[in-house]
Image (spheres, rainbow, N blue to C red):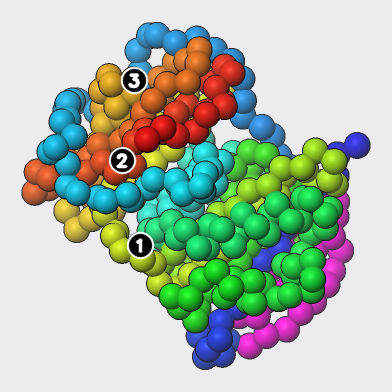
Amino acid sequence: MRSDPKLLAAVVCLSFAACGGSSSEPDAGDGGAYFFIPLGGGSAATGGGYSATGGGNGGGGATGGGTGTHTFDGGTFVDGGTYGVPVDGAPSWRERQVLVLTNAVRLSPTDYKQSPVYAVGSPSLNTATVLSATYPARDPVFNQQDLNHSARQHSVEMGTFNYFAHESLDAGTPGARIKSYYTLSQTYGENIAAGNVDPIATMHQWLCDKATGTTVCCADAASCDGHRRNIMSGSFKALGVGYGFVTTSTYRAYWTQDFGGVANPPAPPLVDGVHLLSGSAQTRFVANYAATGPAESLTLMLSEDPYPMAVELGTSTRGTWFVSVPRGTGCRPYYFAAVDAAGRAWRYPAMGVFLTTGEATCTQEWLP
């Protein structure tokens, strides 16, 4: 029998002024344990979940595309070094999904909560008191490898040893663990969740923060909105996402978000991108763009074929772009290309290609 999903949030800072007060309050939530560790803000909620997987076929047209296409020569891109390239498999495809979704809501919180694609959970995020003016649009957070490793280690440990808490198995605090990996900033925070394989459902858990005994999402700035507060905090510039899946554990799927106050450069306008398995027949490709001027275009290069992308959330200057294509029958290589207002071309990842993990029997994630 599957256990109901659950989650926890905490913010930890070495500077008390940056975090505010601290307290803890255990409580009983809907369908499972519910733990509130503010340490500057934190709460928990429970929610349902689903897994978006399935087969399908390739070929056919794409939806959501723009009007212009660009073909790119690798020599024309701005040199992004190794930006976006996984290191020892991190971030994984699922971890990158949560990174992209986190930036989608940060860049365009109102559009996100009204989206029929991303805000599909229950209770509804689309209320006047959720992702309101209290949490305005923010700059994106950039993937940070050391935070990624901290988050991955914790998610895998929780699943392997079948427990659910911010504290590590040796009773170490989340702050001690994060600091053992991440030294760029004294400001950091953490969200954890369990029970959902699907990243959209996991994001809904964190963003809803349903209070104990209620049937609606927690209101902005209430004592129960700690996960949302972390995700929308302007103090955070870096993020590492960790995912662990252990079939013999209580919740099977374990997620960790570790945030940091400083991100390593570079910070290109083509922030990130990923594919999502949409239903059983479509694969949805999503990328975030954030600059001081509008993008001239964003293009998905899928198996060397260009698919123009369209703005889905926010604007062409700061927003989320997408294109949906028919599901493929195996691994397909892809990357994203953007042309900024100055005519410069950017590539994500800067080197190599992602693969369409989850399409048919495809299990590979990246090729150099």
Residue 106 appears in the picture as rendered: no
Does 266 lie within the magenta span? no
SS category of the residue bearing label 3: loop
SS category of the residue bearing label 1: loop
Q: Mark 3: which amino acid?
A: Ser
Residue stretch in magenta:
21-46
Q: Magenta residues: mostly which secondary structure?
A: loop
Relative to 205, residue 199 above or below: above
Q: Residue at x 50, y 16 (%)?
A: 330
Crowd class of label 1 (few under 14; some 14 to 19; many from 20; radius 10 Å): some
Pair 3/1: label in front: 3
Q: Which mark is residue 303?
A: 3
Image quadrant where residue 220 sits: bottom right
Residue that mark 2 sits on: 351
Residue that mark 1 sits on: 139
Query: Quadrant where the C terminus lies?
Result: top left
Q: Mark 1: which amino acid?
A: Asp
Q: CA distance from mark 3 to mark 1?
A: 31 Å
Relative to 265, residue 351 above or below: above
Q: Mark 2: which amino acid?
A: Met
13 and 224: which one is in front? 13
Discs 1, 2 touching: Cβ within 8 Å = no
Q: Position of residue 232 (x, y in %)?
A: 48, 64
In the image, is 281 to the left or to the right of 213?
Answer: left
Q: Residue at x 19, y 49 (%)?
A: 79
Q: Residue at x 79, y 59 (%)?
A: 164
Q: Position of residue 187 (x, y in %)?
A: 50, 78
Q: Position of residue 192 (x, y in %)?
A: 67, 59
The residue most toward the left is 342
Q: Position of residue 38 (x, y in %)?
A: 67, 76
The residue most toward the right is 1
Does 38 lie within the magenta span? yes
